Image (spheres, helix red, strand yellow):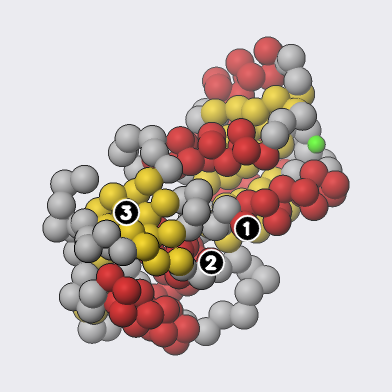
Amino acid sequence: MRLLLVEDDKDLVGALRPALEHAGYAVDCVDNGVDAEYLGRESIHDVVVLDLGLPQRSGLEVLRHWRADGFTLPVIILTARDSWHERVEGFKAGADDYLGKPFHVEELLARLNAVLQRSLKSAPSDQLRKSGLVLDSNTQRLTSADGQQHALTGIEFRLLRYLMLHAGKVLSKSTLMEHVYDFDSDKDSNVIEVYINRLRQVIGKDQIETRRGQGYIFKDTSTG
Ligand code: CA
């Protein structure tokens, strides 16, 4: 999952970024409302954490502009503590959830998980179940159909989570790249092929189908 973190407080970004990356997000950070609005319109992020007090353009304005133009990406706003009017304004502008500062990073991670699951219309859970596989977002471990546990690397985890959340859909290499890497990463789309092949060694080679010239499909063989 690729996350856009919009926050002008450098210390907070410095604390949040590694925690978010550790939790399996590819993170892009911007520190002003104008860049945030522009990046949100690129539709490459799966979720946004949006501070309201920003230079150049306020978070509320950014959010209103996105929603007015039909951008539905999930947004969690960061508000001043005890500022009920900011929360009300935020929800009116189209926020999916909020967190009052200061907050514990664990709470942000839990809310991100819930917002993402809702936006993908499944039940909130730390465990993603598809086609006999169970992917745990806390431990970043995979349990395969035979009950075996597998440790995944960060990229393997992000890639598999994205595939499982979009089971049954054709996903191009460039889409997978966009949702697995952030802007600072070295990008080479051949690397996706390498990771897909590694995942196939763990979950079985037929579970991820290749559509020549189009991309990959994670086959949904279950309703869970
Ligand atoms: Ca701020």
Q: What residue type is labelled 2?
A: Gly
Q: Compute the Cα span from label 2 to label 1.
A: 9 Å
Q: What residue type is labelled 3?
A: Val
Q: Which amino acid does label 1 sit on?
A: Glu
Mark 2 or 3: in front is: 3
Disc 3 vs disc 1: Cβ atoms closer than 8 Å? Answer: no
Q: Does the residue labelled 3 lie within 8 Å of ligand 1?
A: no
Q: Mark 3 highlights which residue?
A: 134
Q: How crowded is mark 1: few (under 14 residues within 10 Å), some or many (20 or more)?
A: some
Q: Mark 1 highlights which residue?
A: 21
Q: Is residue 100 above or below residue 115?
A: above
Quadrant of residue 90 in the image? top right
Left or right for 128, reference 90:
left
Disc 2 vs disc 1: Cβ atoms closer than 8 Å? Answer: yes
Tell me which residue sits at (57%, 41%) in the image.
Answer: 109
Is residue 105 visible in the rendered structure shown here?
A: yes
Q: Residues within 10 Å of mark 3 (few under 14, many from 20)?
A: many
Q: Is 19 or 56 nearer to us in this picture?
A: 19
Quadrant of residue 119 in the image? top left
Q: Mark 2 highlights which residue?
A: 154
User: Residue 110: percent from the left, percent from the top?
Assistant: 54, 37
Is residue 29 visible in the rendered structure shown here?
A: no
Left or right for 122, reference 83:
left
Q: Is 26 or 199 nearer to us in this picture?
A: 199
